[in-house]
Amino acid sequence: MLAAAIGATPQAISQVLSGSTRALTAENSARAARFLQVDAHWLATGEGAPQPFLSDEAVDLAKRYEALAPEQREKWQKTLRKLEQSS
């Protein structure tokens, strides 16, 4: 699945995992991080933590939420709970 998702061959992925080749191309590494939902720097280097990947939309929503006043956050949370209950 990973190979198909990033446009690489299963053999290429196997070589990376077995250590017989050092790394994916930068482009394929970024695609793999997105597909695996992990931090691209962690995937490429092993440094840091494999933090869950957040989409650009999720990051934007988090920034907007952080910019809200406390009472606005409370209203936003109530609205979300109502939406969740209605689905």
Image (cartoon, grey):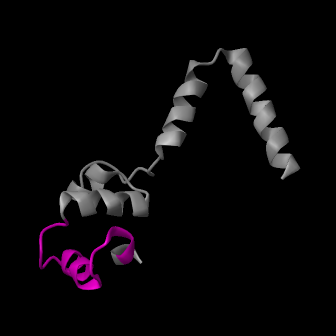
Q: Is residue 22 magenta?
A: yes
Extreme residue toward the right, this view: 86
Q: 86 left or right of 38? A: right
Q: Residue at x 30, y 52 (%)?
A: 40
Q: 57 left or right of 14? A: right
Specify the quadrant that holds the N terminus: bottom left
Extreme residue toward the front, this view: 7
Q: Is residue 58 above or below residue 6?
A: above
Extreme residue toward the bottom, this view: 11
Q: Is residue 15 above or below residue 26?
A: below
Pinpoint residue 54: horizontal percent, then vertical percent.
47, 46
Between 18 and 26, the one lying in front of the other is 26
Pinpoint residue 68: horizontal percent, then vertical percent.
62, 18
Q: Quadrant of residue 71?
A: top right
Range covered by the magenta-colored residues: 4-24
Q: Residue at x 57, y 26 (%)?
A: 64
Q: 7 left or right of 70? A: left
Q: Residue at x 21, y 79 (%)?
A: 12
Q: Quadrant of residue 8?
A: bottom left
Total numbered labels? 0
Q: Residue at x 80, y 40 (%)?
A: 81
Pinpoint residue 74: horizontal percent, then vertical percent.
75, 24
Q: Is residue 5 magenta?
A: yes
